[in-house]
Image (cartoon, rainbow, N blue to C red):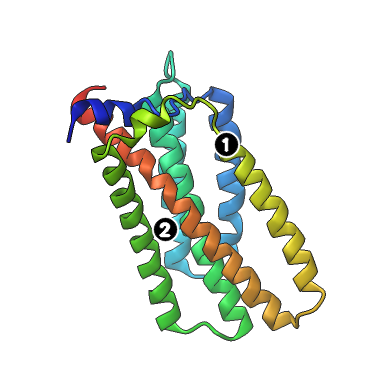
């Protein structure tokens, strides 16, 4: 791949994460891990989440104690952050299916398969755009609309949930929440692109 195209991707929407952001986001992850550890009541799942928490805490301490944060720190932290949210949402999504009476193993395998496919498609999409020099064009537009889309998506999700909850049975509500969480998990898989950006920064010293 053209090094200039790779550089354009690395420089696309660069951010130096702030120390207070690390602390706030870390607290969010720890709060999210509580229901995953307690509600799922599976010792191996609990150990997995605890180890994941400890690893992210270690990374957060490393970033916060640095004299100056860099885009490498940002890519590492948010890659882990979104990956954790994705895994948590898949776990809670399957738990809702279990509560609703649909906790079949083949559904869990399908969800895990879709998770890895989403990550693979993210990498393929990004690498394809790099090869075609798309990020050179994106650099011309400095406005970042991701925040607006996220807020709009959250508002729509809350509104739809309230409308549907009044018309469905309890079992159907759990299934609906499971679908929403699974969709969020697949969306957060896009965050694995941060790892790809970090890889290029280390490999090409960008």
Between the C-alphas of marks 2 and 1, the distance is 34 Å
Instruction: Assign the N terminus to one quadrant of the image.
Output: top left
**Looking at the picture, how far across and down is residue 131, in whole percent?**
23, 39
Q: Which residue is mark 1?
A: 145
Tell me the residue that label 2 is attached to: 48
Q: Residue at x 43, y 53 (%)?
A: 189
Quadrant where the C terminus is found in the figure: top left
Check residue 19 in the rendering and tell me which mark sits there, or answer none.
Answer: none
137 relative to 160, above or below? above
Residue 149's image quarter? top right
Residue drawn where x is 34% and y is 63% of the image: 117
- Asked whether, in this view, residue 37 is left or right of residue 134, the answer is right
- Few, some or many C-alpha atoms within 10 Å of disc 1 (few <14, some 14-19, many ≥20)? few
- Which quadrant holds residue 59? top left
Horizontal and vertical percent position of residue 96: 60, 73
| Residue 40 can be seen in this image | no
How many numbered marks appear? 2
**Residue 191 visible, this orientation:** yes
Q: Is residue 204 left or right of residue 78?
A: left
């Amino acid at each position: 791949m053209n090094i200039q195209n790779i550089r354009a991707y690395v420089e696309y929407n660069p951010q130096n994460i702030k120390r207070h952001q690390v602390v706030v986001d870390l607290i969010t992850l720890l709060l999210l891990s509580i229901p995953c550890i307690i509600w799922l009541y599976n010792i191996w799942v609990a150990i997995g989440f605890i180890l994941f928490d400890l690893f992210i805490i270690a990374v957060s301490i490393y970033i916060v104690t640095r004299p100056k944060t860099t885009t490498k720190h940002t890519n590492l932290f948010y890659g882990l952050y979104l990956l954790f949210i994705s895994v948590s949402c898949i776990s809670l999504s399957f738990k809702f299916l279990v509560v609703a009476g649909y906790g079949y193993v083949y559904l869990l395998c399908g969800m895990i398969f879709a998770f890895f496919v989403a990550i693979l498609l993210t990498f393929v999409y990004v690498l394809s755009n790099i090869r075609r020099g798309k990020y050179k064009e994106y650099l011309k537009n400095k406005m970042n609309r991701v925040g607006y889309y996220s807020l709009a998506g959250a508002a729509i999700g809350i509104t739809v949930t309230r409308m549907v909850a009044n018309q469905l049975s309890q079992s159907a509500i759990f299934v609906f929440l499971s679908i929403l969480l699974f969709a969020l998990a697949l969306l957060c898989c896009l965050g694995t692109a941060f790892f790809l950006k970090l890889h290029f920064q280390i490999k090409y010293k960008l």
